[in-house]
DNA sequence: TCTGAATATTTCATGTTGTCAAGCAAGCGG
DNA sequence: CCGCTTGCTTGACAACATGAAATATTCAGA
């Protein structure tokens, strides 16, 4: 493998990615907190704002146990941001869907996620295209 | 501001960064778990492997309350990975330093953090340099 | 059709992380 | 010496996370 662990260039890129991750994560939590949400609640609400989902699919997306999702959706439901509705095609399943208020909160949350937008302003359109292409190749064709 | 929220290029880059963050975070937790550590414990151990630090400085680095650090260091200390030693120059301060075993664990942890190394193999040296330069400018001159 | 395995969700017990308020010990400026 | 600040810990509490067990439903096969 050409990419040795001790290659200084690679190490610096890894380090930089670590910085980006730390910063993004922190700002995400902060944006969530401004709407009185925890990070986990914000992630679930964002997911559901794209599409209502059964509990187990939320767990798969979050890569956590379904029993954990129960509590998070409980808290979102208690705040009127999310509703559980039965799935007509399978009575075992409960679909979680955002309420009108939940959708509004999700939209405001999206707007306050300035992280990558602001530092991206440093880059020209051409540079952003370059960055996009490099990131695309790094991330690969993962479909989560 | 030229970088409108609805600019599709910027949106895609933000989305990609989100993917990178999710993946990095997940792999970090997983690498930590392979050494029976939580993510927070791994982060503290990594910090201390660079340099012993007083509790309050760990809290600053982790951006959390000092009272939280007490518990994390307690658990690392209970496993013999970290020691608290008094600071001779200020008897209020306790320095947390890795033990020999803690240093070894930190090194193994570092080795298993393949994340950015592996997808980075997709990129040529020139491309990695380009990526490094773009990321540097995004991250800015933050000294944490 | 009946039975048994598999699936979807919840509940419970437990541990870690996080906050905040309060407390204690040690430094520091008057 | 006194009072203020600083560094750390403790205690109470909430959220998140896991794993095991309980419940309800579906589904495949005898």
Image (cartoon, coloured by chain):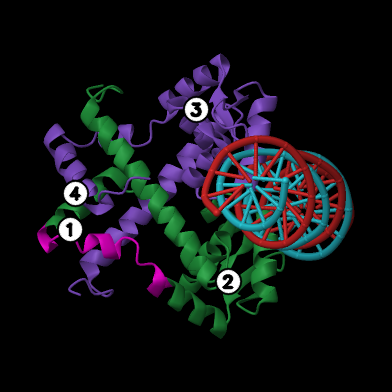
Chain colours: A green, B purple, C red, D cyan
Cα separation, mark 2 vs mark 3, equals 36 Å
| Secondary structure at numbered mark 1 | helix
* Crowdedness near tag 1: few (<14), some (14–19) or many (≥20) residues, C-alpha within 10 Å: some
Chain letter of the residue beneath label 4 in the structure image: B
Name the residue carrying label 4.
B134
Q: Position of residue A27 (x, y in %)?
A: 43, 60
Q: Which mark is residue A128?
A: 1
Q: Is residue A26 left or right of residue B15?
A: right
Residue at mark 4 shares a chain with residue at mark 2:
no
Q: Residue at x 55, y 39 (%)?
A: B39
Q: Are marks 4 and 1 in contact (CB under 8 Å)?
A: no
| Viewer-closest of A125 and A99 | A125
Q: Position of residue B119 (x, y in %)?
A: 30, 37
Tell me the quarter of the image containing the N terminus of chain A.
Answer: top left
Residue at mark 4 shares a chain with residue at mark 1:
no
| Secondary structure at numbered mark 3 | loop
Q: Position of residue A85 (x, y in %)?
A: 66, 76
Q: Residue at x 46, y 44 (%)?
A: B25
Q: Is residue A77 left or right of residue B88?
A: right
| Viewer-closest of B97 and B133 | B97
Name the residue carrying label 2.
A36
Name the residue carrying label 3.
B52
Cα separation, mark 4 vs mark 3, equals 32 Å
Q: Which residues are magenta?
A: A110-126
Cα separation, mark 2 vs mark 1, equals 32 Å
| Secondary structure at numbered mark 4 | helix
Instruction: Farthest residue to the bottom: give it.
Output: A100
Q: Are marks 3 and 1 in contact (CB under 8 Å)?
A: no
Determine which quarter of the picture holds residue B129.
Answer: top left
């Amino acid at each position: 493998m050409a990419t040795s662990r001790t290659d200084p260039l690679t190490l610096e890129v890894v380090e930089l990615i670590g910085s980006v991750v730390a910063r993004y994560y922190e700002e995400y939590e902060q944006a969530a907190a401004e709407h009185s949400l925890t990070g986990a609640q914000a992630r679930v609400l964002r997911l559901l704002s794209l599409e209502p989902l059964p509990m187990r699919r939320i767990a798969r997306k979050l890569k956590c146990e379904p029993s954990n999702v129960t509590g998070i959706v409980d808290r979102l439901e208690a705040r009127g941001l999310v509703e559980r509705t039965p799935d007509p095609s399978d009575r075992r399943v409960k679909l979680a869907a955002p309420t009108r208020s939940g959708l509004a909160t999700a939209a405001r949350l999206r707007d306050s996620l300035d992280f990558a937008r602001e530092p991206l302003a440093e880059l020209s359109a051409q540079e952003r295209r370059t960055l996009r292409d490099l990131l695309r190749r790094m991330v690969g064709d993962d479909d989560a």
